Image (cartoon, rainbow, N blue to C red):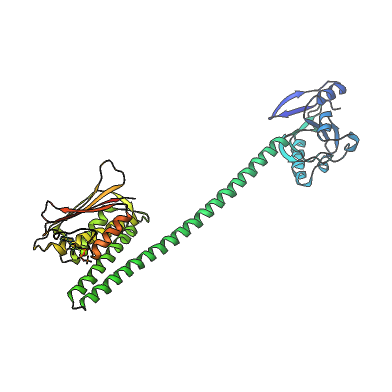
Amino acid sequence: MTDYISENRDGHIVELLGGLSTSFAISILNSSPDCIKLIELDGSLSFMNHNGMCAMEVDDFCMVEAQPWPSLWPESAQQLLQDAMDTATEGGTSRFEAFCPTAKGKPRWWEVTVSPVLGKTGRVERLLSTSRDITARVEREKRMQEHERQLDDYAQMLRRELAEKKELLAAKEVLVREVDHRVKNSFALIIGLLRLQMRNVSEEAAREAINDAANRISAVARVHEHLYRDESVQHIPVRSFLQDLCRGVCSSVGGSEGQVEMVFDDVTVPSDVAISYGLILTELLSNAFKHSQSDDTRVRVALETVPDKADRYLLAVEDNGRGLPEGFTLTEATGLGMKICKIYVAQLSGGLSHSRSDLGGARFVADVSGV
Ligand SMILES: Nc1ncnc2c1ncn2[C@@H]1O[C@H](COP(=O)(O)OP(=O)(O)OP(=O)(O)O)[C@@H](O)[C@H]1O
Ligand SMILES: [Mg+2]
């Protein structure tokens, strides 16, 4: 046993065992929970404490005695050991972490400190290595790293999927816009063809019939245009749609916008409900202009919510014309306009009624559902 054993921790000499008996010094070293080894300057192992032998699963010190210390470690750690030994030989202390399985092959990680042991003359005579088992910590860190890696992979996968979905969505949006555009053009083409045909027909009744058909198709086309414009495929705000529709009907019957007073509550309804409103309104408004027989036709068009009744609306059209013919009844009315109104009012679980308007002419009110 050496005369002086100094253990350098954190750069401080903390223990000086000079002058102690060998057995006492060994018993002190054996009491350390760490694996303590003495290494000769030629690198051979000359001592290993009791806990070290347990930790390294060395049953008998003879198995490792006088063997070059680095040769007991895996090749990947040998350079670290050599460097630490060189530093200690020159009087310095170094610390590193490395992997070394036990003699029986159990995987272990160690925090190793190598420091010089000085003789009486102050010269380095041996090296002292303290290895602490840090396997639990390293494995915990590895598990955390593995979790982090898995999370990173997962996040990357999600980012990739999101990017793909965004791309698909963008492509779909382009497609939808293209389809919308084509539908809009097709409606315009059909309406244009009907109007062209109308100009080539000399009979007044036939011209009117074609114009009515064009107006009815316009009502459907306008709903589509509003859906497309508002970028909502299910619901549309009714006010702007009905205003737009009234203007269209006015111009198609040769009237002006100023002749129609519009009172529309600001409500939103499903697109198929809006189409029904549009078709009903087209018929009632066309009738107001067509049958008023007034030089200065005035029409009031309204969509109002029914007080205390959720999702019920009153769609009313009244004019200042000559009023309904004597004995007019809805059940007996045979025109296509009234038929269309009745069909769509029934679809909206509603009822259609008529009366005399304050304006002097006819008044039609459809009590309809908004869903
Ligand atoms: N605002 C109104 N003022 C006066 N009479 C009207 C009014 N609305 C409808 N009528 C009467 O009700 C009848 C039925 O109307 P309806 O819309 O069903 O047929 P139409 O307008 O004559 O023809 P179309 O099939 O082109 O609509 C009309 O012919 C007209 O006599
Ligand atoms: Mg009509």
In this image, 144 relative to 198: left or right?
right
Q: Is residue 168 left or right of residue 277?
A: right
Q: Position of residue 359 (x, y in %)?
A: 11, 53
Give the image location of residue 135, x and y in percent: 73, 37
Q: Residue at x 36, y 64 (%)?
A: 180
Does any portion of residue 125 appear in the rendered image? Answer: no
Q: Quadrant of residue 242?
A: bottom left
The mark tally for this picture is 0
Asked where in the image residue 77 lies, by quadrant, the reply is top right
Does residue 93 appear left or right of residue 302 in this picture?
A: right
In the rendered image of this protein, does residue 151 appear above or below residue 60? Answer: below
* Ligand 2 placement by image quarter: bottom left
Residue at (32% x, 53% y) in the render = 348
- Depth order, front residue of 21/362: 362
Residue 104 visible at all: yes
Q: Quadrant of the N terminus?
A: top right
Splitting the image into 4 quarters, where does residue 28 fall? Answer: top right
User: Residue visible at 69% across and 35% down?
Assistant: 137
Q: Residue furthest right?
A: 62
Q: For this rendering, which residue is in front, 56 or 294?
A: 294
For this rendering, which residue is in front, 197 or 182? 197
Whether 149 is drawn above or below 218: the answer is above
| Residue sitting at the far left | 295
Q: Position of residue 16 (x, y in %)?
A: 77, 23
Q: Position of residue 313 (x, y in %)?
A: 27, 49
Q: In the rendered view, does 80 fall on the left or right side of 363?
A: right
